[in-house]
Image (tube, helix red, strand yellow):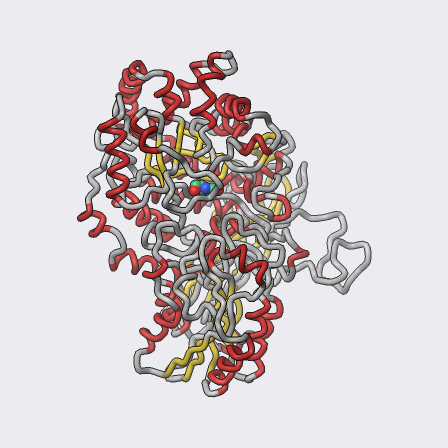
Amino acid sequence: MYKQLVAIALIGLIQPLWAQQRDAAMKPFIDQLMKKMTLEEKIGQLNLLTPGGGVATGEVVSKDVEQKIREGKVGGLFGVVGQDKVRKAQELAVQHSRLGIPLLMGSDVIHGHKTTFPIPLALSCSWDTTLIRETARTAAREAAADGLNWVFSPMVDIARDPRWGRVAEGAGEDPFLGSLIAAAMVKGYQGNDLSKEDAVMSCVKHFALYGASEAGRDYNTVDMSRLRMYQDYLPPYRAAVNAGAGSVMSSFNEIDGVPATGNRWLLTDLLRKQWGFGGFVVSDYTSLNEMINHGMGDLQTVSALSLKAGLDMDMVGEGFLTTLKKSLQEGKITLQEIDAACRRILEAKYKLGLFQSPFRNTSEARAQAEIMTAATRQLAREAAARSFVLLKNDKQTLPLAPNKKIALVGPLADNKRNMLGTWAVSGDWKQSVSIREGLQAALGNAGSLVYAKGADISTDSFLVARANALGVEIEKDKRSPAEMITEAVNLAAQSDIVVAVVGEAADMSGEASSRSDIGLPESQRALLKALKQTGKPLVVVLLNGRPLTLEWESAQADALLDIWFGGTETGNAVADVLLGKYNPSGKLSMTFPKNVGQVPLYYSHKPTGRPFNHEPFAKFKTNYLDVENEPLYPFGYGLSYTNFSYGDLTLSSPTLRAGESITASITVTNTGNFDGEETVQLYIRDLVGSITRPVKELKSFRKVFLKKGERKQIQFTITPEDLKFYNADLKWVYEPGTFRVMVGPDSGNTREQSFELK
Ligand code: NOJ
């Protein structure tokens, strides 16, 4: 698996001939152009604005955008929706500004453009990088057909605190899985040639460490050791850079006491000098101005600091636009620094082919033909089904037996509005398929489906007011909670089985949606309790943008299917899975804690000096008085309708030497009643080191499809490269000694063997 990452890195480094030729022609072209530019026009290129109309994620929306474009004071726009409007803005720049420099046209294409795929956290549970790359490719095609050339994705922030709402936008807790997904997304967006009309430039975010905000509160302080940074948090950004990402977005948080947007160590020493990044860096939404609140000085000071740190483009805040000239006159920055940033922006435009083709062949006809087609919807349906995680399935409650009377209940069962999940700025929820619609269409005349809402998503007025800040996702029903529950219970009593669709509203996770209580809202728990009392088998289908605390819910449910937010085709995908057309195969990319007090809880933790290994409670060991240490569902966990049995793990040799490899083999058998797919996971522990090492780290995995009764031997090659880590001097090394290899269906259930690295 290490080889996969190296290959991706090499592809990023080895430039094809045409790209070398293009880059050779790029320099003289930009030299010529920059000779013609005034200082104001150069500074203008560093300015990114949003004219409003889309979703503003800060308090400021840009003003006088049209005039500024004409004056050459804008390098790019985002939040312009529709190819016709994008074209108009581009016309202003190309035809009505003095030098006719085209604009970067960005957007938050996070999990699809118009066709909305499952939220990124969900997609990561597919552990399927080919699928994920294909969703990004499709999103790029749609975005490009809509006039866009730049997407603010992927978000690759490692996140281990589910209170943080933005875990929904990333790939979970693990750097290895996260790195593979980061690279796959960049490749998907950018294709192999940025100047092709269906490619868009990717923007990796949020650089860096944003996922480690203290207490899970958004925009909060981050403080961590360099070791943890290098080992756990930085790898996915680096993988995205190695995969060729054209741009990077700085994060809101501070790192070692300096906000990322003005952090020279981060943006220059690490990103450019150590990693060799050659693209441009854009700030996050007013993150430059927010350095004033961080206590770093006034707007002129923080703007100069950021430019000197290596920031090239200022998103929305206009700190660069309004202060850099003055700072230059006062000798606080140099013309070379402005030129360097300007050049990087112009290079991005050049690579995108915008100087030759600013409109990139967009038209109404192309948009019609390429956006939201039967094929994109089909991909969304498959992606959704492949991202669902089956958390429980007692007595084979699922798949639903044919011709049964189903009571479909719950506030999210017949609810299009909440299917897309957070950050679907261009998605149209009205075009999404609700679960009721999906099930009804699939059942046709077979069986019968009755429906009751049963509860509001939440009746907590404090939470509802905040969660509805971007629009009403949590509606208040006219009926009382008791009336709604009674209706649901009556339907349940007359049915063979209950399917309860519960969870979070779309914007109960996502940006600025941190929660201190990550349980199911009380109104929905009351509904589940009443349904359970009917004695009917209870299937719980859960929508969520983060791991939730579900100990009680899991005990009530006979089957528990986590569908996250599945996007446009949610309802059809749920029908595919509930009715057994698709056998679920998702595996958690983030640990589910038992309660919020266990957070942060992640599988690759360090050993302590006083370990507590499942024995009865013992004083003076690392544990709690009121809860076990173990999670409710560990990283990598997920069931199937079939069963997979694992044979013994064998190693080809008890020793490994430099330049050699050993093979770990295990036989997996499908012993159940369905064909199905398993994700076989390999973890390694370095038992003794010069610094402490995690109790296990994911090093490889293999997705394997096995027909009923079929068995396959799965082999993993382990080389010394797989055993490297950052030592106390931040050197990437391996150290001789004993290593434990663990293979199994999840991080909490593995077979073990050991070998010596000589
Ligand atoms: C703020 C968010 O942090 C970032 O992810 C997003 O790309 C920008 N706003 C632009 O909308």
**Residue appearing at x 34%, y 56% in the figure:** 428
Indicate the quadrant containing the C terminus: top left, top right, bottom left or bottom right: top right
Looking at this view, name the residue that lies furthest to the right: 619
The quadrant where ligand 1 appears is: top left
Is 37 located above or below residue 633 in the figure?
A: above
Q: Looking at the image, can residue 595 be seen?
A: yes
Q: Eyeballing the image, is 338 above or below 316?
A: above
Residue 29 rendering spot, x and y as whole percentages: 27, 19
User: Where does residue 76 sit, x and y in percent of width and height?
Assistant: 35, 32
> Is residue 552 depicted above or below 508 in this figure?
below
Residue 675 visible? no
Q: Which quadrant of the view contains residue 198?
A: top left
Farthest residue, direction left: 365
Is 236 above or below relative to 259? below
Taking the view exactly as shown, the residue that stands out farthest to the bottom is: 494
Q: Position of residue 227 (x, y in %)?
A: 62, 36
Q: Nearer the viewer, residue 163 or 675?
A: 163
Q: Position of residue 315 (x, y in %)?
A: 44, 34
Image-based side of 507 in relation to 108, left or right: right
The residue drawn where x is 48% and y is 43% is: 156
747 on left or right of 584: right
Q: Disc count in the image? A: 0
Image point (55%, 56%), residue name: 635
